[in-house]
Image (spheres, rainbow, N blue to C red):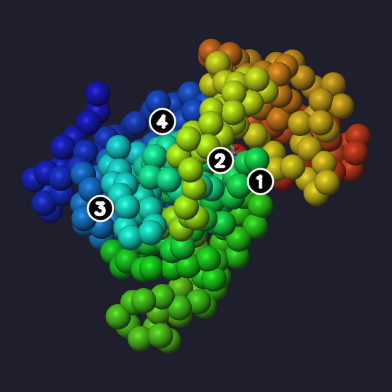
């Protein structure tokens, strides 16, 4: 394996890998390699690593890769994995503090165990806290940002900020840092605002969140989690690699219904298939290339556009270069 310990370089303690196959790190199990991939030892190490990077090095944070397609030509720059690295979860007064790499289902179980209600929906979302914050992940009426008290972010200069919902424009599976909003940096309000205005969501990342939840009943929450998971097993093709819903549901309708109505269930491109069980899922039947998956995404989009005049928006994120 192309793994390089960089302990002796600049005091970093994480692991740097070169040409890391992203198929190993995405739930679709397809796609090309990242030029470099870094697994930080912890939060301090992540900060030191970001600061050590050349200014124009592209950086992409990846949690469990459950909403991500990396094209076959791979990803230029450095991928940073949070899962297994930023893994602290604990009670903080009446809130739950979880670092960005904690799996969302772990938050759901931790909340239930400590008699908090309202995080049960996270049990069925197979990503991390960081990915849930970036996507405003949700299901069955629950949404990540509805249960957030505050988040901690880190930028590539190593500056950490506390932010709240008010700092973001938050919608259905979208979260955008508002231009010009304040932070808690040392450079004065104006300097911080100017800095924030320049930031894209990709230059400031989530490293932790505080979840604020009402008190609940552990037994009830656990029963709800079991029911939600059973519902998923019954309706989603979870035995084959996938990335959940490919498209957002358009206002007042369901992407799955529209794709099914176009007769696309069962459509195949190479090793990728539009699921027979849920038309908004594309599964890897074993040997799919990212280009097969992307071809099916385009076919579904175009068919729905042609038949219904609806421009389906992608929920999954596509990054990297074509082969
Ligand atoms: C079987 C299945 C079911 C699913 N069901 C649902 C569902 O019900 N509801 C739902 O909303 N989603 C669902 N998803 C999609 C996915 O699980 C969620 O979007 C999840 O929150 C993504 O988390 P992740 O850690 O895997 O993110 P990744 O896929 O690793 O990343 C997704 C995006 O977030 C960015 N990102 C990741 N971490 C950070 C960070 N720390 N800071 C800033 N940006 C970051 C990435 O750069 C990328 O752009 C499902 C997926 C699968 C496979």
Q: Is residue 185 above or below residue 76?
A: below
Percent x, y of residue 36: 32, 40
Residue at image coords 30%, 80%: 186
Label number found at residue 114: none
**Viewer-side residue, 278 vs 119:** 119
Tag 2 and tag 1, C-beta contact below 8 Å: yes
Q: Secondary structure at mark 4?
A: loop
Measure how far apart labels 4 and 1 are at the Cα level.
Answer: 28 Å
Residue at image coords 48%, 23%: 29
Tag 3 and tag 1, C-beta contact below 8 Å: no
Tag 3 and tag 2, C-beta contact below 8 Å: no
Q: Which residue in the structure is indicated by mark 4?
A: 25
- Camera-near label (2 vs 4) is 2
Mark earlier in primary sequence (3, 4): 4
- Camera-near label (3 vs 2) is 2
Q: Which residue in the structure is indicated by mark 3?
A: 43
Residue at image coords 15%, 45%: 13
The quadrant holding residue 84 is top left
Q: Which residue in the structure is indicated by mark 1?
A: 141
Percent x, y of residue 146: 57, 57
- Camera-near label (4 vs 1) is 1
Q: Secondary structure at mark 2?
A: helix
């Amino acid at each position: 394996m192309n793994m390089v310990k960089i302990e002796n370089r600049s005091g970093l303690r994480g692991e740097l890998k070169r040409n890391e196959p992203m198929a190993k790190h995405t739930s679709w199990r397809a796609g090309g390699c990242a030029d470099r991939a870094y697994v930080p030892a912890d939060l301090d190490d992540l900060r030191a690593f970001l600061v050590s990077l050349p200014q124009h090095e592209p950086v992409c944070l990846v949690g469990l890769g459950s909403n991500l397609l990396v094209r076959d030509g791979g990803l230029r720059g450095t991928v940073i994995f949070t899962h297994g690295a930023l893994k602290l979860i604990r009670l903080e007064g009446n809130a739950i503090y979880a670092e960005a790499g904690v799996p969302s289902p772990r938050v759901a179980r931790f909340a239930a165990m400590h008699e908090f209600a309202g995080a049960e929906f996270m049990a069925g979302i197979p990503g991390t806290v960081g990915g849930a914050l970036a996507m405003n992940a949700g299901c069955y009426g629950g949404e990540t940002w509805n249960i957030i008290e505050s988040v901690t972010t880190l930028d590539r200069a190593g500056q950490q900020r506390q932010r709240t919902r008010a700092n973001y424009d938050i919608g259905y599976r979208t979260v955008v840092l508002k231009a010009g909003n304040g932070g808690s940096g040392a450079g004065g309000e104006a300097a911080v605002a100017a800095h924030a205005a320049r930031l894209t969501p990709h230059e400031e990342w989530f490293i932790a969140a505080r979840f604020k939840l009402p008190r609940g009943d552990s037994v009830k929450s656990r029963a709800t989690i079991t029911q939600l998971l059973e519902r998923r097993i019954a309706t989603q093709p979870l035995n084959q690699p996938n990335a959940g819903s490919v498209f957002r549901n358009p206002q007042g309708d369901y992407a799955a219904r529209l794709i099914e109505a176009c007769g696309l269930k069962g459509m195949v491109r190479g090793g990728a298939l539009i699921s027979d069980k849920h038309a908004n899922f594309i599964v890897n039947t074993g040997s799919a290339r990212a280009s097969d998956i992307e071809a099916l995404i385009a076919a579904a989009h175009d068919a729905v556009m042609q038949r219904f005049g609806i421009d389906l928006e992608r929920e999954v994120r596509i990054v990297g270069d074509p082969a």
